[in-house]
Amino acid sequence: MTFLTVSERKRRSAERFAAAAEAVMADLSAYARAKGSPGRFIVFGSAASGSMRYDSDFDVIVDFPPGEEAAAYNAVEDACGRHGLKADVLAGSLIDGSFIERVMKAPVRILP
């Protein structure tokens, strides 16, 4: 019987979450391209900086036109669910512009 240390389990979880985040970003890029709208997903936090941890979630701002925002929000939830990530999704229409400005000063990945 093989036992894993706590630090090894955390390392493996972080690696799995990093791979899942890349898969989610690929799904969201494909979604945004298929829509062909001016919408975008702004990924920030550990997924954007490449520093996923065992307890990381997927931080993203859904920045789509009002008529498309709910569907794009659901696309994030669905993609994260498929890949086993907790999602922290913010609707661009509901957050203050100064928050987006702060987010944009840190590492971000803008999709598509």
Image (tube, rainbow, N blue to C red):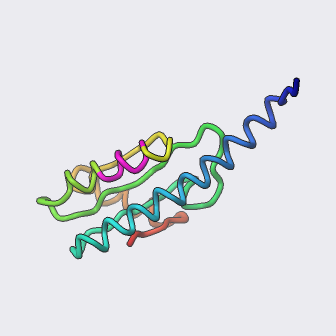
| Residue at horizontal 64 percent and vertical 47 percent from the top | 16
Relative image position of residue 8 (x, y in whole percent): 81, 37
Between 10 and 51, the residue placed more toward the observer is 10
Residue farthest to the left, as pictured: 67
Q: Quadrant of the C terminus?
A: bottom left
Between 11 and 51, the residue placed more toward the observer is 11
**Does the magenta portion include 77?**
yes
Q: Main secondary structure of the magenta part?
A: helix
Between 105 and 2, the residue placed more toward the observer is 2
Above-or-below relation of 109 to 1: below
Q: How many marks?
A: 0
Looking at the image, residue 92 sits to the left or right of residue 21; the answer is left
| Residue at horizontal 67 percent and vertical 45 percent from the top | 14
| Residue at horizontal 27 percent and vertical 72 percent from the top | 34
Span shown in magenta: 75-81
Q: Quadrant of the N terminus?
A: top right
Relative image position of residue 95 (x, y in whole percent): 28, 51
Above-or-below relation of 47 to 86: below
Relative image position of residue 33 (x, y in whole percent): 31, 74
Residue farthest to the top, as pictured: 1
Above-or-below relation of 40 to 98: below
Residue 2: name its quadrant: top right
Looking at the image, residue 66 sits to the left or right of residue 34; the answer is left
Relative image position of residue 52 (x, y in whole percent): 63, 50
**Does the magenta portion include 63?**
no
